[in-house]
Image (tube, rainbow, N blue to C red):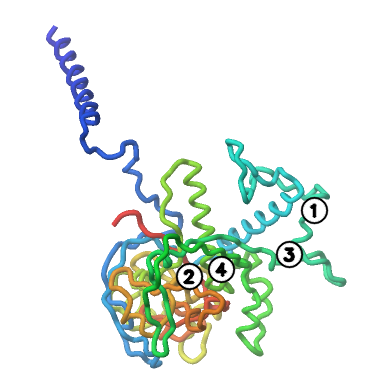
Amino acid sequence: MWFKKKKIKIVLGAFAVAVIGCSAELGGELIGVQGRNSRQGDVPPHGMVLIPQGTFNMGLNDQDAISSMSASTKTVSVDAFWIDQTEITNNQYRQFVQYVYDSTARRLLGEQFDEFLITEDAFGNPIDPPMINWETKISTKNPDYVEILNALYTPPVRGLIGKSLNVKKLIYEYAWIDYNRITGRGIRLSTDDIQIIGEDKTDSPEIIQEAVPVYPDTLVWLRDFDFSYNDPLAFRYYSHPAYDNYPVVGVNWKQATAFCHWRTKLMRDYCLKIKRPVPFEYRLPTEAEWEYAARGGLNQQMYPWGGPYTYNKQGCYMANFLPQRARYGIDGGTRTLPVGSYQANDYGLYDMAGNVAEWTSSTFDEQAYKFVNDINPDYHYDAKDGDPLAMRRKTIKGGSWKDIAYFLQCGARTFEYQDTTKSYIGFRCVRTYLGK
């Protein structure tokens, strides 16, 4: 009998809690919006490493040997972020190119076959422009399909076998919002320096439409080197499976930025499908983020592995670069090597020095450290047609297989123009962490 009474008390107690909870919600108490799954944190992205928030001294930790006038230092702080463990490889970039090919093919087919496009939503409202229907399969046995898709290929040339893809038709189109019009911040080139000035504010941001050719410039292996036999790399470096795990090159800043947008779309579409909160977008790292990650927690050290030498106690070089006097091969590779061929830094990141230099999102200016903020510093400008040439300079970091040890330093910085492709520049992505 006692047991039954106690059981009744427990049930009544639970009922009382439920009543109190309901009365608190109905009684005008501030309890926040319910059912938001606040425990859903930032899901670790594949192939990325979390870099904790922190403060470091940004800039060179040795003499400015080449007198580049960029040797100033600045104490800055950065928020936590995810960063790719390795540089983007040929095979990873190929997924992007394949997506653009598939979407271009479906839009071409959709001009004559309605099953390749979605023109109405679930409520019968028109969709303009139409969305791609990825469910319909493209059959290469259908002669009507093949005839339409021939527009993506160059006609067969006499004496050559087969037809080849016209890579100039692989265009990735997307839009992004320029919030500078709302915030009232603009950039002007004066006679002495690039200055940040205020502009008239507007009520709406500017929507920028981009159309970016995505196929890598494979001819960089010929263009970058006069009187040198690099034909095998020009014709096979990107396309052959043997180079799948090598860093992609021949990609300019615009293409790398477009890749980040597509990677964001890939993740966003998946999150919406499984009803998971959408994380921050993928993007190129700022100069400060890149350098902070490269140091691996070793503040005021020359290289990602510390320093001051480029080899370890056993005499083995720590990166793929140009050691001694043009002896390219003594470090293990005459040109690029598969990503992760050398030891990672203390954050678990590979090739933060050597192999290929890497694009950052930051615009290059020799005096940038003097005017950027000390928290999440970034000098960013998307140059357009008609802008001064200086505005097209983007900061690259890390040094490459063809650079001397100076450029391998975490604090070393140089630039390349945003529409330029090189055989020694690649990139990796970052994503802001949802939290502190």
How crowded is the residue under tag 1: few (<14 C-alpha within 10 Å), some, or many (20+)?
some
Name which residue type carries label 2.
Answer: Ser
- Disc 4/disc 3 C-alpha distance (Å): 19 Å
Sequence-wise first label, 2 or 4:
4
Q: Residue at x 56, y 68 (%)?
A: 255
Q: Nearer the viewer, mark 2 or mark 4?
A: 4
Q: Position of residue 414 (x, y in %)?
A: 44, 83
* Location of residue 226 with respect to 151 vertically, above or below: below
Name which residue type carries label 4.
Answer: Gln
- Disc 1/disc 4 C-alpha distance (Å): 29 Å
Q: Is residue 24 visible in this depiction of the protein?
A: yes
Sequence-wise first label, 1 or 2:
1
Q: Is residue 201 left or right of residue 212?
A: left
Q: Position of residue 306 (x, y in %)?
A: 32, 77
* Location of residue 305 with respect to 4 vertically, above or below: below
Query: Disc 4 marks which residue?
Result: 255
- Disc 1/disc 3 C-alpha distance (Å): 13 Å
* Mark 1 residue element: helix
Numbered tag placed on residue 165 in the rendering: 3
Query: Disc 2 marks which residue?
Result: 341
Numbered tag placed on residue 146 in the rendering: 1
Q: Nearer the viewer, mark 2 or mark 3?
A: 3
- Label 4 near label 2: C-beta < 8 Å? no
Q: Residue at x 74, y 61 (%)?
A: 152
How crowded is the residue under tag 2: few (<14 C-alpha within 10 Å), some, or many (20+)?
some
